[in-house]
């Protein structure tokens, strides 16, 4: 039973010639919903951490399913002297080999791109034995040692409330299987809604945590159960195939979950192993052919290319499940010791487990959004769906919250929230005595709602790229209009000119008391202009009239002029007070709201604002590289891209396990900001226009394929700063391609293809 005959790639993107010490030496793998950390140790064993996008515990933490250890015996005595572990991103598998030539043990691991199963295959020219051992995440109920940035912050109701880690359960898998699960017999959901004044929703909704059950079963050819945690071969063989079937479901009884496991196994067994690997590799090949940026021509070009490829690979490994990609670790969290550069010094030197995440199980909009902006130009629209679906599912709660807290129509989403839409209780505030429901304790997010505007801008960009009318009418607009309605209903004050005065608000997390914050005004301008630019008939006459009137009520962006320098600078707000964080809110007019940039009026204002910014930082969620690219500042953009893609966690072996920075490991913001910056250095779009090479360094040669609005793809080759080849699909869009005018980058000139 040899490996399938599918063609192996000629060169892996990552290859190691020594085993690893622990999970920090792991490689990532996944199919979009199920993911693995894979590593081999010097003992000759292979270990897998198993994760899933929907394995939410009773307290709202995203947990590992468990760890599996593969032990080989009966091998040649000197086989461990030679080792190789290789990741093939274009075919979605990891190959681990010990020995060489006629004494080589080869293992191939992949998470089926089309079925909910992990497949493990080991073969050699000699017979050997295999043992598979289950190492559970938690076997006993224990009180949790609380840390405010970690466990239980979604549903905890007071600082002194004890929290417990609930155990996993080993089940009877029969003679030839391992079977285990974690089942939520309690939930923080109901008490969280009561705590936040939303108890009226309890009878109208279903608890997303209660009885959620997640686990897996393991079975393999010629493997028998030695005990409930161990499978072992009863005789040596030259090849073993092991299938791991993870499953998450909410069921009324545990037996019903087991029935679903059996059904999943039966469905997966309908396809042969050889057929599955062929279809799996076809999926990954199609994914890689969807988009690429491959650089050459300078010392850092290969590193940047690899970073782009690996960041996109990690997104694909975890981006097709029921929930969005977690910004603080994705599905690839590991064990370790807190480093001295951890943002929270009180934790330095302490151990953490693979379930740990700084900032816990909630979703931070400002961080999560960066992952999804990186998917537009790569055309990864299938990976976007879990993000906007989360907000669409949470929309009824967001509407009820606006009604209960402010007695107005519309909807708003907090900056930090549980996946069902509520605040995290630690941010909402534990002590509610004498407080109104709208009195949010955390001042960093108290009036921070502009994420809804950015989500709206993103959804309109998705529509602009796909021309998907069904998506616009059934998904995008039902989210966008309640968000706009909330803004218009909440801010009722008008200035002497009849414009809205945005008071009792803030400018991101940095200025907690602000009037007319730029991010909100820029966001409203951008979103309303995008809506009004939709084809005639897309909006009803009533909706179009509302958007037009709202747009006319918006105040101008806050600015300050310096006549003696003939300069104008954007401001974070018209009025603002104490500086509390490390953001540059004024540059939201560049990204995510592209009001200033190459080919647009006011480019020098944007550039002066950028050069005058207070925070000049790299890494994590800082957006300097993106904003530099959009402003045509090539040197700055190149520097930021190179910096981020050459800085990963020094304790981790995999070069794209960035962080922790401000978040966790891998820090998905860190890589995503660079992907966005690199894409915008190469190509930008503005309405019907496509702008090529707005911030491209001459020393970087490049092969690329990127996606533009109106279902357009551009495939080309750049050499010495010139476009040598360009394929445009559909060809009629070639007339819409421009390059910056080198004498005045506010102007564009039509692209002329180089022979």
Image: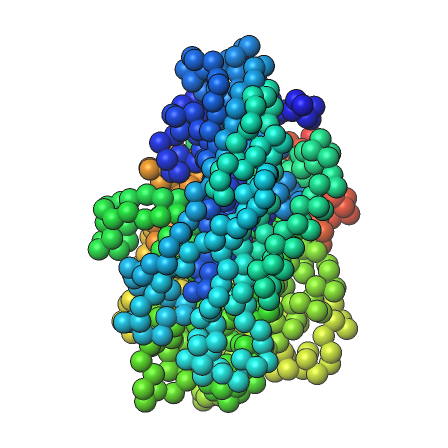
x then y, percent, for residue 642: 42, 38
Up/down of 691 relative to 77, above or below: below
From the viewer's perspective, is 633 left or right of 524?
left
Name the side, left or right, on which 350 lies relative to 439: left
In the drawing, does residue 237 fall left or right of residue 737? Answer: left
Q: Position of residue 277 (x, y in %)?
A: 68, 33
Q: Nearer the viewer, residue 669 or 734?
A: 669
Front residue of 291 and 739: 291
What scheme was used to colour the molecule? rainbow
Question: Would residue 4 be seen by someone viewing this image from the given angle?
Answer: yes
Rendered position, 35 above or below 148: above
Q: Position of residue 474 (x, y in %)?
A: 70, 69
Percent coordinates x, y for residue 478 in the rendering? 65, 73
Point 36% across, 63% down: residue:
164
Residue depicted at 45% across the width and 81% down the height? 194
Q: Residue at x 47, y 22 (%)?
A: 73
**Displayed quadrant of residue 725:** top right
Tell me: residue 98, above or below residue 593.
Answer: above
Residue that extends furthest to the top in the rendered view of this protein: 102
Count of picture labels: 0
């Amino acid at each position: 039973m040899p490996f399938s005959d599918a063609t192996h790639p000629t060169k892996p993107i990552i290859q190691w010639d020594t085993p690893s010490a622990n999970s920090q030496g792991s490689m990532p793998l996944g199919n979009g919903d199920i993911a693995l950390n894979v590593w081999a140790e010097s003992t000759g064993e292979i270990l897998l951490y198993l994760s899933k996008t929907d394995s939410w515990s009773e307290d709202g933490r995203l947990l590992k399913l468990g760890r599996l250890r593969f032990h080989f015996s009966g091998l040649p005595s000197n086989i461990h002297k030679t080792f190789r572990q290789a990741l093939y991103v274009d075919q979605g598998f990891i190959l681990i080999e010990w020995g060489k030539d006629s004494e080589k043990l080869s293992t191939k691991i992949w998470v089926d791109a089309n079925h909910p199963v992990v497949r493990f295959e080991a073969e050699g020219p000699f017979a050997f034995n295999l043992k598979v051992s289950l190492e559970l995440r938690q076997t006993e109920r224990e009180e949790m040692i609380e840390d405010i940035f970690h466990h239980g912050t979604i549903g905890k109701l007071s600082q002194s409330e004890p929290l417990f880690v609930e155990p996993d359960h080993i089940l009877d898998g029969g003679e030839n299987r391992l079977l285990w699960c974690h089942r939520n017999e309690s939930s923080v959901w109901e008490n969280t809604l009561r705590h936040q004044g939303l108890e009226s929703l309890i009878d109208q909704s279903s608890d997303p945590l209660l009885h959620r059950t997640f686990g897996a079963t393991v079975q393999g050819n010629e493997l028998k159960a030695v005990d409930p945690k161990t499978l072992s071969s009863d005789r040596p063989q030259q090849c073993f195939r092991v299938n791991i079937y993870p499953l998450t479901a909410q069921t009324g009884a545990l037996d019903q979950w087991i029935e679903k496991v059996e059904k999943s196994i039966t469905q997966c067994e309908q396809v042969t192993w050889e057929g599955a690997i062929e279809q799996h590799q076809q999926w990954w090949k199609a994914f890689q052919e969807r988009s690429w940026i491959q650089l050459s021509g300078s010392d850092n070009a290969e590193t940047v290319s690899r970073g782009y490829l690996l960041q996109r690979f990690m997104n694909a490994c975890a981006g097709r499940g029921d929930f969005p990609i977690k910004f603080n670790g994705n599905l690839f969290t590991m064990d370790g010791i807190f480093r001295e550069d951890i943002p929270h010094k009180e934790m330095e030197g302490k151990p953490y487990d693979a379930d740990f995440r700084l900032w816990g199980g909630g979703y931070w909009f400002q961080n999560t959004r960066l992952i999804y902006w990186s998917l537009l130009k790569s055309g990864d629209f299938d990976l976007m769906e879990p993000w906007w679906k989360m907000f669409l599912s949470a929309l009824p709660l967001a509407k009820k919250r606006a009604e209960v807290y402010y007695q107005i129509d519309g909807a708003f989403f907090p900056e930090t929230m549980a996946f069902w839409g509520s605040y995290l209780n630690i941010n909402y505030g534990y002590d509610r005595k004498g407080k109104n429901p709208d009195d949010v304790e955390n001042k960093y997010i108290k009036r921070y709602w502009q994420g809804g505007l950015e989500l709206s801008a993103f959804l309109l960009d998705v529509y602009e790229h796909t021309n998907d009318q069904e998506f616009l009418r059934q998904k995008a607009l039902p989210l966008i209009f309640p968000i706009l309605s909330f803004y218009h209903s909440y801010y009722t004050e008008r200035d002497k000119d009849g414009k809205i005065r945005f008071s009792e608000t803030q400018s991101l997390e940095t200025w907690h008391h602000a009037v007319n914050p730029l991010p909100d005004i820029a966001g409203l301008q951008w979103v309303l202009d995008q809506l009004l630019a939709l084809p005639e008939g897309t909006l009803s006459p009533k909706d179009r009239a509302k958007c037009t009137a709202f747009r006319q009520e918006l105040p101008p962006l806050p600015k300050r002029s310096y006549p003696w320098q003939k300069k104008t600078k954007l401001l974070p707000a018209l009025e603002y007070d104490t500086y509390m964080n490390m953001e540059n809110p004024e540059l939201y007019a560049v990204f995510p709201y592209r009001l200033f940039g190459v080919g647009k009026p006011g480019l020098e204002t944007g550039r002066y604002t950028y050069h005058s910014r207070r925070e000049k930082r790299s890494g994590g969620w800082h957006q300097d590289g993106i904003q530099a690219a959009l402003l045509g500042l090539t040197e700055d953009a190149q520097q930021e891209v190179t910096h981020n893609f050459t800085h990963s966690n020094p304790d981790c072996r995999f070069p794209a396990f960035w962080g922790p920075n401000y978040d966790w490991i891998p820090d998905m913001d860190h890589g995503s900001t660079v992907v966005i910056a690199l894409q915008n250095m190469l190509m930008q779009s503005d309405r019907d226009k496509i702008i090529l090479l707005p911030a491209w360094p001459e020393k970087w040669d490049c092969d690329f394929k990127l996606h533009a609005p109106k279902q357009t793809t551009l495939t080309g080759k750049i050499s010495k700063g010139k476009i040598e080849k360009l394929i445009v699909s559909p060809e009629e869009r070639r007339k819409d391609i421009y390059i910056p005018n080198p004498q005045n980058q506010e102007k564009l000139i039509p692209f002329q293809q180089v022979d």
